[in-house]
Amino acid sequence: MNNSKVNKEKKPLKDMDLIDDFLFSEVMSDKEKGKVVCRLILSRVLKREVGEIDFTPERIVPGISERNHGIRMDAYITEFTEEQDIKKDKIKIFDLEPDKRSGKKNGLPRRSRYYADLIDTQLLGTGVDYEDLPELVTIFILSYDPFGMGDMIYEVGSIIKTHPEVSYNDGIQRVFLYVDGKLPENPGEDERKLRDLLKYISRSVEENVKDKELRKLDDIVKSIKIKPEVGIRYMKSWEWEKEIREEGREEERKNTVAERRRADKAEARVKELEGMLAGFKKTDMNQEG
């Protein structure tokens, strides 16, 4: 195995960044701290104040049948647009997904589509009108450039291709954020604040704390890292991943041995047939003589 890969996998907890799946999940698992982080991220992405929210970390949504894929959302957030109002037409749903899996880049648009479809099946019950579906915004925070243009923000929405001037609102919006992407032309304060947040999420260190809100975020991250129970869970997760890798290598070794044995048998059979053929030719020559 490549040494750089091993070192990357053995990243100490104290050096982990918020974009790392384990640390993000641990922050979200603390209900109070997770809510603060969700509000900060949403407010900077949406460029507005965020209303009352509730969220579920690592929400599991099953497939429509046992044969279909389910999904695990890193943070499923509900925003109530009116206080104490929980009617479906008064809420907005957000799916927040940090992602470092650059190898899955090509499947990202369809992954986003599938997430939205499964979420909708959970939101629309029998007898509920389609117009009652709440607005859904999926936000991906990515360590890689999803579309190769080098930009920090990619916003995706449905349009009528033949009549782009006509409004078409299906209630779904997708936002892809590239943590190392460039700012848009003539950026305002909102875009700069979002860039600062993304830099901190990507590299959660002191020098990336640029304002009071990020200071609060940094305090939360540090407090999570020093929790003994978090350290124990991280060690257990590392041991589990190590076991999976070792099982994979053992399976690969067994397959390699089996392939070698099959090749050896095939080679021996070829030599046997060649020997038989040579014997037949020798017999034919003797008969002809």
Image: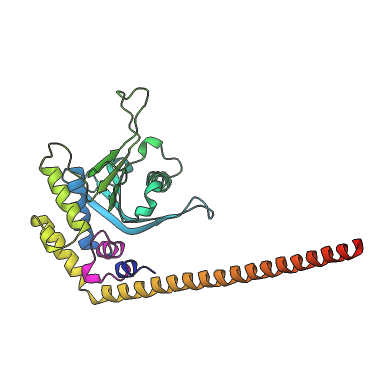
The C terminus - image quarter? bottom right
Q: Residue at x 55, y 72 (%)?
A: 254
Residue 248 image position (x, y, % from top left) = 47, 69
Q: Which residues are magenta?
A: 9-28
Residue 111 is one of the magenta-drawn residues: no
In which image quadrant can residue 276 be found? bottom right
The N terminus - image quarter? bottom left
> 259 left or right of 7?
right
Q: Is residue 50 visible?
A: no
Magenta residues, dominant SS class: helix
Residue 22 is one of the magenta-drawn residues: yes
> Front-most of 6 and 225?
6
The vertical placement of 131 against 150, above or below, is above
Q: Is residue 191 visible?
A: yes
> Front-most of 98 and 245?
245
> Front-most of 63 and 164?
164
